[in-house]
Image (tube, coloured by chain):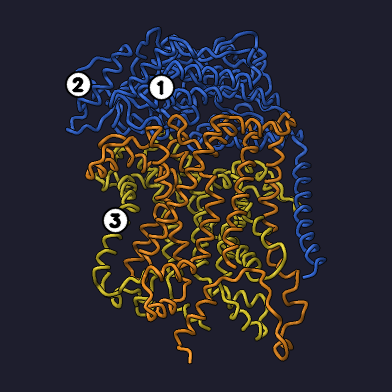
Amino acid sequence: MTSPINTLWERAGQAVKPRPAGHAVKPRSGAAAARRPPAVLRGSSWLPWMFLAPALLFAAVFKFIPMVEGIRMSLYKVQPFLGNEWVGLQNYATVLTDQRFLDALGHTLVLGVGQTVGALVVGFGLALLLEGQARSLWVLRTAVFLPVVTAVAVIGEVWRILYFPTDAGFVNQILATFGLGPFSFLSSPDSALGSVMAVGIWSGAPYDMVIILAGLAGIDRTLYEAAAVDGVNRRQRLRHIVLPGLRPALTVVLTLAAIRGLRIFTEVYVLTGGGPAGSTEVWMTRVYSLGFERNDLGVASAASMLLLFVTALLTIAVRLITRRREA
Amino acid sequence: MGLTMRISSAKRAAAALSAMALVGSLSACGGDDGKSSDSSKPLEVWSRSAPDPAKTYEAILAAFTQKTGIKVDYQGVIEFDTQLQARASSKDLPDVWINDAGLLGSYQSQGYVTKVEKGDIAGSDQITDETWAQNQGLDGATYGVPFSRQSFATVVRSDWRKKLGLPVPKTWDELAALANAFATKDPDGNGKADTYGMVVPGSSKRGYIGWWASSYIWQAGGDIVEKSGDTKYKSVINSPQTKTALEWVRKQFCTPGNVVPGSLNLTTSDTPFFGEGTAGIYLTGPYTFSGYDKAPGKDKYEVIPMPKGPVGTTTLAEGENIYFGAGSDKTAEQKALAEFLISPDAQKIGMAPDGAAQPVVRLPVNKTLDAGAVRNDPRWKLVQDEYTANSKAFVWSINFQPIRQALGEGINKMMSSCSSDLDAGLKSLDQAINAELKSQDLAE
Amino acid sequence: MSNPTKSKPARLNIPSTRFDTALGWSPRFGASTVLRIALCAVVLFIFAAPFLTIISGAFNETTDSTQLSLYPSDPTLLGFRIASEKGIWSYFLNSLVIVGGGLLLQVALSVLAAYALSRQRFRGQLVVLLLFLLTMMLPEEVIAIPLSQVIADLPILGISLKGSVLGVILPVAIWGFSILVMSEFMKEIPREIEEAARIDGVGEIRMLWTIVLPLCKPVLGVITIFGFMMIWNQYLLPLIAANDPSDYTLTVALAFLRTDADVGPGVLLAGALIALLPSLIVYLLMQKSMIRGITSGAMKG
């Protein structure tokens, strides 16, 4: 006779394993089939489109129409009043041959990867630490969420004070207790990028924490009990129950990272504006300098299209990677 | 599902999307047929103003309507550039707008503004010829009516200076010494080393450090761009004089305390230090006086004459112009508004001398008015005198913003290290400015 | 963490056990609890201590932008008073109206779309998801001008949304983030539950409303709080859609308050504090849905 625990494990194997969408289910036979709703209403090809229609309609009007216009603008020298001049791929050439732009690409990658990994790891740790029903945890989770709700301009002000480059600066004072000398942080081209990355991780970790907490809430508690009875230790439980159970949460975080990682802008702009000496220049700050601040919408659109293209590729890659593991 | 169903549902989705895109682009293209000549529509006037200064404009325009009977539809716009571009795209520019004089070249090259016939404007002789000359476009025609002007002034914490027993600085060296004293000699007497010398907007964002340092470059005898033909320009930034200026600036950044630490990343909105009482010297515009009168307080600070550099005391001049929107059919009304705005009455309302409203005219362009007299404030007379005697503006007839951006980026880089190679930095800055001029078809 | 039976929120009657959390924190007081308290203190310091600067700056007579201040030395409400004089509360109201309408519409659209993407079978699912994700990939400044033309002249209907709250509510209703998150989590619901319901003849709409959604409470909480913040923090869109400064939202108002030469950093911090409170309150309320609750029973169904 199979023990109740083993049955639970079997169910665990089924419950935790995510089903790929679009997976066909064999039709039932007999009496069950007779009670099914008529074929027209059941799983027929137009029903999903009815559910998708509102979202697609809004997307078309408020996102895709402007986007198409954006693509058009990238091929022209945009002169709103005098009439646009066709320049073909020249805007793209301007962007790709700008030396500072190419430098910005490197910084964007470093920041993107660093912030994504950092925020994910710290966010995961925060979620594990602060999970639970106690009221004190509730308060803690709210306090930890403050970096996310505060306006970026204010975060910039606060961190500029924290990062004050003399030994009177707050972070320098704390580091001094560990015997580490005063750092220039944002004032030196060597340390500015790392300092910006730290702020990005600080404000991104609580964001990921919330998503991971939602994922943790969805894990069946009976699995923990069953695992404990079977003598599974904490590390194995994390690996075999928690991490697989977090698949949707992790997929979301990684997809978002792919989409937003290259677009990092506001924090950098507020903290350093791309300096000093261009050491924190990223893709979007360059788009600002090359495009918007020169009223050259054509170049700005071209740079943004390039960004869109790379982001789309990255997102497809992330979706494919997270899909294949589901088999 | 069968092959046919797969294709048809994908096709359906694509068809729906492209139909929407097609309809959308058609209606967006068709759009407005532009301005309809409807004389009952009021004159549309814009200014780049937050709600408080906008009220001052409303007062001026109300007086205009009362005097001439012309109705005005006024808006104080914040995201001015984006909104103006949006209007330009639909070929529906405002009839008149008031904005930074430095944008004249940009507006002219994009075709946004129409020529101004100086002779046609009544009262145009009340504005000096030099002021009119600033508003010329590349072709020599005038493209904007002057509305307000200003030049930069040095404000100093007089209570600190007096406490330390130091005189008003008259040269660069004395200025630097004063800054250092403010940083090292505890002028606020609280026993803590929490005060600094100069406030500097040192960021490369929007070219801020270039904007601030330009006065000092000119005071050393250097310059940024120069005319090299009828409508051509070239960069002259790489000169020994500019190097002298930048060496002095870098020395300030590298002497601890002379400049507020961390300034390389700051723009003017991130530098409240003078008002807060953490720094004692600031090269800034006169629009800050009303704020500083409250904090740190009118009796605690002074406006000093510009300390002399190696060659002179030149300071950066800026201003606002009245621009006539292209494509407008209200040319008579445009002219009438401009005539009113440069008249002494309107200029006085704009200066808001009683302090109740926020001023939108700093130094009046109308030469019959004296800023110090109208405001009953000798500090304003100082600013006006320095503006008339020794001020210099950026080249307004070209799109100067990208050059200011390049200047800011170059100087920011040179200031980021105390051992930077100024010769190499100036050389690459020179190349960057020439490249920008070339892309604007202004190079020889 | 003291004895959980005394500290748990009143509404949840499930006794706290070792199996409530992934790491298995023990509800009894012991060595691991001490470690947890220590870690929580460090975390609290790192993430929340910088806010003491904001709070002390907002309530202080003067500010010092070169030093961290942890408490106001001259406590005053002056900053808030000046902010009120500048009309901050009417902008606050505008923001509330826009967020209220926008969030409702956004959640509705996202739930419907996510349901189709995750629970229904049709060809082209990856493409549709990518289309929704594509809407997040272009910076909004680039599409600002074409978008303003669309708002001023809606395709087919030809009406203008400028000056109306709909000018902001309608464009924000479509957000790829909500659709992505909802669809990922909806995929997790076991097929047996759905099949059991289908045997009973439950149609799609009822399936969504009575069975799938109740199981998605944590995710609904997530998209509510993030959707709230996304709409609350909108800057360019309210600027484009406004016809008059009185249409502006709080975020826009605080941005131009920054350019006001007479306004000091204290007033800006007071404004920032007012601006972040609603998001924090929504987060507090949504946390309830994200805590493991009675919903655990349904999984075994």
Q: Does dot 3 land on a helix, a strand or a loop?
A: helix
Q: Which residue is mark 2?
A: B164
Q: Colour of chain C?
A: yellow
Residue sitting nearer the eye, B225 or B74: B225
Q: Is residue B426 left or right of residue B80?
A: left
Task: Look at label 2 and name its amino acid.
Answer: Leu
Q: Which residue is mark 1?
A: B375
Which residue: 59% across, 20% down? B435
- Residue C174 at x, y = what percent? 62, 57
Q: Is residue B339 visible?
A: no
Q: Given the image, what chain letter belongs to the residue carrying mark 2?
A: B
Q: Given the image, what chain letter belongs to the residue carrying mark 3?
A: C
Where A263 falls versus B286 (above or below)? below
Task: Look at label 1 and name its amino acid.
Answer: Arg
Residue sitting nearer the eye, A96 or B12: A96
Q: Residues within 10 Å of mark 1 (few under 14, many from 20)?
A: some
Q: Colour of chain A?
A: orange
Q: Using the numbered discs, state the Cα–Cα distance from disc 2 to disc 3 in whole angstroms.
A: 44 Å
Residue C6 quadrant: bottom left
- Residue C151 at x, y = what percent? 67, 48
Q: Is residue B75 visible?
A: yes
Q: Which chain can be seen in blue? A: B
